[in-house]
Amino acid sequence: MNRLPFAVFKWGTRLSALAAPLCVLALLGYLLWRGIPTLGLELIFGQVDPWDALLGKKAVWEGLWPACVGTFKLVLLTMALTILPGIGCGIYLAELATPRQRRILDIAVDMLAGMPSIVMGLFGFMLILFLRGTLLPGANTCMLLAAVCLALMVLPVLIASTREAVGAVPQNLRIAAAALGMTRVQSIFHLQLPLAARGILGGVVLSMGRAAEDTAVIMLTGVVANAGMAGGVLDKFETLSFHIFYISSQYQDQNELLQGFGTACLLLCASCLLLIAARLLESGFCRRWQKGEKR
């Protein structure tokens, strides 16, 4: 038997498995090499004293502080709009939906998950044009509109994680709850949700990371360069992701380009921390149920 085709296939799959981590390491290494030297208080606060910026005594126009605050506010507003419908839909799909309803909702969630982010941003922009011509003549792009579009984009992530976490609760616990006289709703709220909380929280953290790093959606829904500190949800705003895009396309010298690399490092660190937190929560949830099943 000729083993050459098998050997070629075996080594080909090994090289393919190495390609992804090597590419990631190369990209991260280059980004960190160019960005780490620029990190410092001056990158974030410019020439303004950090305490004055933190207390709001002086505005920061040459640093990343407005973009950091804008990113934080945008993510919080996005999650405030996403958590309730995302967790609710995930619970419904896992426990209450009929097979036909589950198929229909699965198709809708998959279509929403596959929607390009630029299309979601275009939807928000067209929504503002519609409102401006009909109900709200003064409507304009703002942080609230960007958060709504981002919420639609990250909703499938939270639905899928909630459905998986709730569905992973062992069936014998559901049977025990029914034997004790608990209704389906009581079993969900008093048994399954507390047990699935860690997995659901992992999905929330992943959704936060996805919302913080997206650029295409917010480009059409309210983000601008040098907007300063956003005072409310109806104002224009800055974010770290858009700052990277703006610097990379409009930089005038190497110092501005290096500032873009530093901004990318900050956003990368924030995304990595959120991803690590989500993985730790997910692994802890899995270990908990594996121990429970062994017992």
Image: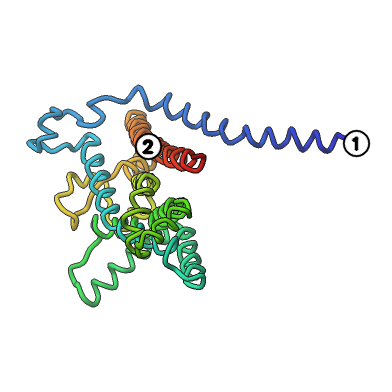
Q: In this view, does 248 lie above or below 77?
A: above
**Residue 127 seen in the current view:** yes
Which mark, by number, is residue 2? Answer: 1
Q: Which residue is drawn at 13% across and 34% down?
A: 53
User: For the residue marked with disc 2, what is the amino acid?
Assistant: Ala
Picture layout, residue 187 above or below residue 59: below
Q: In this view, does 61 lie to the left or right of 23?
A: left
Tag 2 or tag 1, which sits nearer the N-term?
A: 1
The residue that disc 2 covers is: 277
Q: How far apart are marks 1 and 2 (CA)?
A: 48 Å
Quadrant of the snapshot with the N terminus: top right
Q: In which quarter of the image is residue 163?
A: bottom left
Left or right of 20 in this view: 90? left
Task: Find numbered disc 2 in the image and state the secondary structure of the residue it sits on.
Answer: helix
Residue 178, percent across and down?
40, 61
In front of the other: 210 or 292: 292
Mark 1 residue type: Asn
